[in-house]
Image: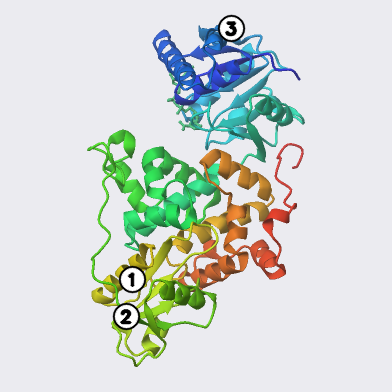
Amino acid sequence: MDIREVAVIGLGTMGAGIAEVFARAGIGVVAIEADPQALNRGLGFLDASLSKAVSRGKLPASEQAEIRARIRPAVGFSDAAAVDLAVEVVPERLDIKRQIFAELDRVTSPSAILATNTSSLSVTAVAAATKHPGRVVGMHFFNPAPVMRLVEVVATVRSDAGVADTVAALARRLGKTPVQVGDRAGFVANALLLPYLNQAAELLEIGYATREDIDLAATAGIGLPMGPLALLDLIGLDTALSIMEVLHAEFSLLRYAPAPLLRRLVDAGRTGRKAGRGFYDYAAGVADSGGNGVSSGAPDTVTLIGDGDEAETDLATALASAGVNVTRNPAHPTELVLVAATAGRKILPAALAAGRPEQAVGLHLPRGFADGRLAELIHTSLSSDKAVAAGVALADKLGLVVVHAPDRPGYLVGALLYPHLADAVRMVQDGYATAADVDTAMTLGCGYPRGPFQLLDAANPSIVLAGLQAMQEAYGFPSLAPPVLLAEHAGAGIQWASFRGGAGARDSGRY
Ligand SMILES: NC(=O)c1ccc[n+]([C@@H]2O[C@H](COP(=O)([O-])OP(=O)(O)OC[C@H]3O[C@@H](n4cnc5c(N)ncnc54)[C@H](O)[C@@H]3O)[C@@H](O)[C@H]2O)c1
């Protein structure tokens, strides 16, 4: 089916960008708003975005007027009668969306496709407001629509065969990369991203780590462009909360229960950047940041305790090249006992065995997916402030950036990352998306430099598996149970990059 003219209903944050994307691809757009005032505001967003693209050299000035001429502003739906596709981009409320779809169903030709840009509502429930649910799909763009390349195309159990394929082909014509999935809350990107962000809020709430360390663990430790708490502030804590509520209502998993702190900050009006304050305070124009601990001189000699494994060798090499003397004799009276940490290893037993637990800390160098600069300094319940300060100074001498973590499985980077990777594997195991689609969704939709499966390969699936097993043993939450598919692949040494399995769900025609 050839899409020549589309209607975009709602020219807010997303709709104005979506109208621009269609017009820039040479497609005529009927741009519909609720009233003339909202229409002017929406066209203002669109004009400002086009002018910005011209001033940044992304769009030749000569094309601006041509693109603009393809957009036909309208109040009311009568101008949508002849369109081939209508994309609804009104506020995230089922009652408003159902009303719009009932109206679109009445005015458009029965052969036209009707799409919703909803992020978290059921596309099926929206489709049920029409007499022709077979032509209704989700077409989920990301913010800002002219820039972000991902489009999630969602088919419902009622969608006619071929409708989602037509919309996916159109997305490619717009220069986007479609990922086709069935109608499940959060689709791929939000269903994976939001629980990870929510868990970061939970770690902060229980005092597991500081706000700065949680964000640093994600950026320097995992290589993500932004820390989860800073990202929550950017997305808006209220938006994040409502998506978590939808996920929790759909799947009833404890992991999807919104962190109480998220709810309290929303109650307090601290919804993030837009409110001037969320997890960080933006009132002064830049996010405030707390300090990161005491400073002291680095010890010249440390007692190194390890398992004779790679972690110990790595640490011994780093210490030697920084000119720090190492003794392996616990009785030698050094200021610091350094336990070489590996995912899943507890520090306290080694510290007790050394006989000087108050002088002992763990040091973990997460490998594989970060830039190798980050060290996790692990405190046991018995580590003294002096030992922690000496550990910080030592890490500084080794040229490492430190985050503090308790002596719990996964430490800090793993506590954030391993359950997130497990969610991604579970999504493939459940047949909802392919591993390649998950990686595409997270790189193009969330700005990950590498998708979860690329991260998993880089981190070594066996280490992630061991970390998850230790976390589940410690906490007992079912959502921490390593997915069977992860255990199978780790056991067989299968690289996810070479895994072509995982059907990917297209609900239409499947049930
Ligand atoms: N903002 C995001 O980052 C983002 C990202 C992806 C998807 N979404 C989804 O896109 C949709 C819109 O979100 P938004 O952030 O652009 O909201 P928004 O509030 O910025 O824009 C909604 C627009 O719809 C208009 N509108 C309301 N009722 C209307 C009607 N009856 N007829 C025509 N226009 C009407 C409003 O005047 C407003 O301009 C939501 O479903 C949201 O979940 C948002």
Mark 3 or 2 closer to N-term? 3
Q: Nearer the viewer, mark 3 or mark 2?
A: 2
Residue lying at 52% horizontally and 83% vertically, measured from the top left: 308
Q: Is mark 1 within 8 Å of ligand 1?
A: no
Q: Is mark 3 within 8 Å of ligand 1?
A: no
Is residue 355 visible to the viewer in this orientation of the structure? Answer: yes
Q: What is the number of the mark on residue 394?
A: 1
Question: Residue 380, located in which quarter of the rendered image?
Answer: bottom left
Which residue is denoted by mark 3 in the rendering?
79
Quickly name the residue at label 2: 336
- Give the number of the mark in front: 3 or 1: 1
In this rendering, position of residue 509 left or right of residue 399:
right
Are the two marked residues, 1 and 2, in contact with CB atoms closer than 8 angstroms?
A: yes
Kind of residue at disc 3: Asp
Amino acid identity at mark 2: Leu
Is disc 3 placed on a helix, strand or loop?
Answer: helix
Residue name at image x 55 percent, y 50 percent: 251
What residue is shown at x 61% (from left), y 30% (from top)? 139
Q: Nearer the viewer, residue 168 or 450?
A: 450
Q: Residue at x 37, y 81 (%)?
A: 325
User: How many marks can you see?
Assistant: 3
